[in-house]
Every structure is written in structure tokens, then in C-alpha cells.
Amino acid sequence: MSVCTEQAARLLTQPVTPGAPATEEVLGLLEDRTPLTSGLRLLGERVVAVTRRPVRRNGQDLGIVLTLRDHTNLDDMARELESTRALTDALRAQAHEHTNRLHALSGLLHLGHTGRAQAYLRELTATTSVSAPPGRIGDPYLDGLLAAKTAVASEAGVTLRLGEDTWMPGRLTRPLDVFTVLGNLVDNAIRAAASGEHRPAWVEVSLLAEERDLHVYVVDSGDGVALADPFVPGASTKEEAGRGLGLALARRTARNHGGDVRMGPVAPGQGAVFVAALPGVLSPAAALAWEGAE
């Protein structure tokens, strides 16, 4: 390495010395010598935008210039935006559904079908909102996220369902971090199910509380994971900018809590299984409910 600015050195997790051999971290950024514009990478706890430009003069290879920009704050803002968007999308979907129901009820009453209108009202009272998977969680953040993801899945021709073994008393204390993990796992599963050969396509989410710890299981009907290690930052089967960070971000967030995200064993009829452990993200009420259930 010939030159390294102080700003770039602060973004790298391994110390660099100009004139010394490049560190493994830098070599990882240089392993591909093709030009790169604002490719996102995870360096330790930071999300960094990397620009890579080969330098040539008179046909001679003079090396590569790497430009590093810290996008961690932008990433945090994006996660907060995702949380807000999930809730607003859920509210919008519910408002749209309620409008349709009112129109149907109004039509029945206008035509004088009072008995049918009463039966329709009883049916609505006995069922949950169709904008969320059957079996609501009870936490407003999770209900909002799952309702929004259900709408996204439906548009992709995928059914999102809640596992029958789901049990999550209490509320989230770290909703933003849970959104990062669960949201990325569900998004990946929806894409896998939609592009897979199995029909009907589906994604199943199970949430299990253990005292104040949350265990997440996301299973899809896709064709399985083609990558050797899907958690490597930038690993993706899609040649699109910004792809391949979702699972890496989910694992990093879980590990910040002392947990992890990993692949689980696959049963017949399943494409992929991802399991996440998020310690300490539930309210004390969940711990009390766990003690009472023992």
C-alpha cells in the first residue's frame, strides 16, 4: 500500500501502514480489479461505500485507488425509514380493506339484503384482518411489519403465513434491530419463493419467546440457497448494486445483541430455513410469561 488517508484508516478495522503489504481487509477490496462505483461493504460495525478505480498511464498498470465513505448513519436512517414504512403500509392496507368491506356492506343494505349484511358483519367480527398473516402477534411493531410484508408477498404471488408454534408474549424493546433481522430474512425468503419452481409459493415465519430472548424462524418454498456462504457481504446471485448486504446486516445486528443468524436444517418441501436468535429484545413481561408457562 502506497498512500492511505487518515479518514480511510479510521474506516478500516485493521491498521494500515503506507509502504507495508496490504492487509487482508484491503486485499479483499482489491481482489477484483474491475471499476466499482459506490459498492456497499461491511467493515466491522460500519457500512462503507467503496469506489474502486484502476489507474493506468501509457498502457502501464499503476495500481488502484480505493475511496471509502461511511454510510453507517445512512444505513441507520434507512432502517428507521423501513420501520416507519412498514407501519404506514400496514395502515394503508388496512384502510383499503376496511373501505372495501364498507362498500360491500353498503351494497347489501342498499339492495335490502339485511340478513346477508348481518351475516357478513358476524363473519368480519370473527376473523382477523386479511392484511396480516393469520394469528396476530400483539406487538404493534411486529403486526405492522408482518402486515406490510404480507402485502409485498401477495404482490409477488407468495403467501406469507405465521407458524402455528408462534408464541411471543410481551412487547419489543428494540424494534429497530428486530426489524433489521426479521425484515431482511423475510424479504430474502419472499424473493426466493417467488423465483422458485414450487407452486403455490409460500413463506412461513415463526416467532418464539424464551424469557426476554426472541427466536426467529423463516422458511420458504424456494429452490434453496445457491451461494456457498450467503452471509458474506456482497454475496448475491443478482448483479445489482447494493445487493447481498441483507443477510450480512441481519447477522451483524443479531451478533451485536450476543445472538446470531444461521441457516437451519431443511425438511422435504422446504427451500431454505434461516434461524435468528436475538437476546434481550423483549420486555420483562415476556420473561414473566415464560416463567408462568414452565
Image: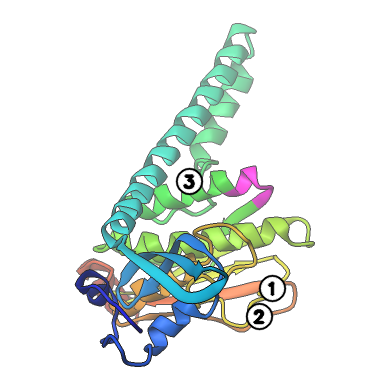
C-beta proximity under 8 Å, tags 2 and 1:
yes
The quarter of the displayed image where residue 201 is located? bottom right
Dot placed on the residue nearer the N-terminal end, 2 or 1:
1
Q: Position of residue 204 (x, y in %)?
A: 58, 63
Q: Secondary structure at mark 2?
A: loop
Quarter of the figure with the C terminus? bottom left
Residue drawn at (29%, 58%) of the image: 76
Identify the amino acid type marked 1.
Gly
Dot placed on the residue nearer the N-terminal end, 3 or 1:
3
The quarter of the displayed image where residue 248 is located? bottom left
Location of mark 1 (residue): 224
Task: Looking at the picture, tell me which residue is in the foreground, 104 or 8.
Answer: 8
Q: Is residue 168 magenta?
A: no
Q: Is residue 220 left or right of residue 258?
A: right
Task: Looking at the picture, tell me which residue is in the foreground, 190 or 40.
Answer: 40
Label 2: how many Cα within 10 Å (few below 14, some 14–19, many 20+): some
Query: Which label number is shown at residue 12?
Result: none
Location of mark 2 (residue): 266
Label 1: how many Cα within 10 Å (few below 14, some 14–19, many 20+): some
Q: Is residue 153 above or below residue 270?
A: above
* Residue range (magenta): 153-158
Label 3: how many Cα within 10 Å (few below 14, some 14–19, many 20+): many
Identify the amino acid type marked 2.
Val
Residue drawn at (34%, 47%) of the image: 81
- Whether residue 214 is visible here, answered yes or no, is no
Q: Position of residue 185 (x, y in %)?
A: 50, 65
Location of mark 3 (residue): 148
Identify the amino acid type marked 3.
Ala
